[in-house]
Each structure stands twice: as structure tokens, then as C-alpha cells.
Amino acid sequence: MNWLLKIGFFSILFISSIMADEIDKSMNIIENTNNKLKTYQKKIDNLDEKTQEILSVYKYTNAELKNSRIYNNQLRKILSSQENELKNIDQQLVDIENTQKNIFPLMLKMVDSLEQLVKMDMPFLLEERTNRIEKLKTSLDKSDIKTAEKYRIILEAFKIEYDYSNNIETYQDKIDNKTYNFLRLGRTALYYQSLDLKEYGYWNKQTKSWVKIDNSDAKSNIRKGIKIAKKHQNVDLLNLPFLTKKGM
């Protein structure tokens, strides 16, 4: 019996040893498996992070692409609009050039008509008006003055001449190198008075000459008119000779 017990005991020890080895192997397998699972999980986690990064880059790139498409579409519209604007500008330049070709002869005629007006008109402020016309002629020949500016100063000269018809004025000027006081009533009448208040006369439009005035009432009215023009006296009715010799 003793030997049987010994055999049984050793058998148990052998089996225990084998089982211990198997357990160790199993534990090692489990540990290795766990390690591999951890490694796989890390790889999965890394892959997930990379996937998220790639997804973020994709979303950003996709958004940029959409913005680029919108910008390019808008840019195409702007370029198209600019092309049309350039075409309009080119046409405007052509129109301006044609207008300048047509307007320059017109401006020449306008200056010429002003010159004729001064020559045919009463001889008031003759030097000033003649010089203004000469300046207009000079400006037409200057390349540094734009056409619009040339046209503007011509219109300004016309306005000055127009205003002469609607006001009264007194000034000093000369007849045959002698200085006189002059009284202009619009474009209706022009009178002179010597500085010593002894000589008086008026411009006869029909004969285009100066006519001496001897009538004392006419002289008195000329003096009154000069005071009114100087604003030294209130506006009053004037009895003055015009185109006829009545009352001279």
C-alpha cells in the first residue's frame, strides 16, 4: 500500500506540475494577448486621431474650396463688369474725341461773335472787353487748357456781356486821350461827363459818334445818374436824351 500511496503522491505532484506549467503558459498567452490588444488599441487610437486629423483637414480644404469657388465666380463677374466698363470708356473716348472735333469750330464761332458784338456795340469798357476776347483767342490755342475749361471761360465771357444789359455803371475812361466820367445805362445809352463837370455828351448809335449835350436838364440828370450808379443817391427817374436830338 505504501508504494501505491507513493505512486499516487508522485502522480499528483506530476499532474500539479504539468497543470502549473499549463497555467503559466495560459497566463503568458493571456498576458501576451493583452499586450497585443493594448498595442492594437494604441494603433486604433492613433489611427482614430489620424482619421480625425485627416477629416479636419478635409473639412477645412473643402470649405476653402467652396470659398475659392465663390470668390472665383465673383471675380469672373467683376472682370466681366470691368471689361464692359472698359468698352464703355473706349466708346466715351471716341465720343469725346468726336465732340471735341465738333465743339472747337463752335467755340471759334462763339469767340468771333463776341468780337463782332464788341465792335458793333456802344464803346463802353472797350479796352477791358477787347482784352478779354484776345485772352479767349489765346486760350483756344493752348494745349494745356482742357476743352471743357475753354468752353467754360467762353460762356463766362458771354455771361459778362449779358449782364451789361441789365445794370447801370459809372467808370472813368478816355476819349481822345482825355479822361471823362462815363455813365452806362444797360446797353440803352452811354454818356460822358468831364472831370470839371463842364462837358457832357452821349453816344449816338446811328452815327456811331459822340454828340455834345448842351441842355442843362440833361446835364443835371447825367450827374444824378452817376450818383445813383455810385450808390450815392437813391434810385430816381432820369430824364435823359437817347437816340434823338430832342432836348439837346
Image: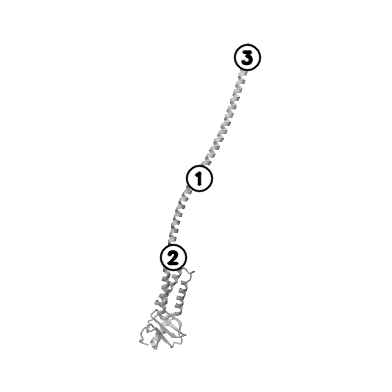
Q: Which amino acid does label 1 sit on?
A: Thr
Q: Residue sitting at 59 percent across and 29 percent down?
A: 32
- Asked where in the image residue 181 lies, by quadrant, the reply is bottom left
Instruction: Find the distance from the CA under tag 1 to the CA under tag 3.
Output: 78 Å
Label 3 element class: helix
Q: Mark 1 points at which residue?
A: 61
Q: What residue type is labelled 2?
A: Glu
Q: Report crowding for label 3: few under 14, some 14 to 19, many 20 or more residues within 10 A (C-alpha).
A: few
Q: Which of marks 1 and 3 is nearer the N terminus?
A: 3
Instruction: Find the distance from the CA under tag 2 to the CA under tag 3.
Output: 130 Å
Q: Mark 3 points at which residue?
A: 7
| 114, above or below 62, in the image | below
Residue 156 horizontal/vertical position (percent): 43, 72
Residue 40 horizontal/vertical position (percent): 56, 33
Q: Quadrant of the N terminus?
A: top right
| 167, above or below 57, in the image | below
Q: Which of marks 2 and 3 is nearer the N terminus?
A: 3
Instruction: Find the distance from the CA under tag 2 to the CA under tag 1.
Output: 52 Å
Q: Which colour scheme is used?
A: one colour
Q: Choose between 115 and 245: the one closer to the eye.
A: 115
Q: Name the residue under label 2.
A: 97
Label 2 element class: helix
Q: Choose between 177 and 15: the one closer to the eye.
A: 177
Q: Report crowding for label 2: few under 14, some 14 to 19, many 20 or more residues within 10 A (C-alpha).
A: few
Mark nearest the camera among 2 and 1 is 2
Mark nearest the camera among 2 and 3 is 2
Q: Choose between 158 and 190: the one closer to the eye.
A: 158
Mark nearest the camera among 1 and 3 is 1
Q: Can residue 167 be seen in this view?
A: no
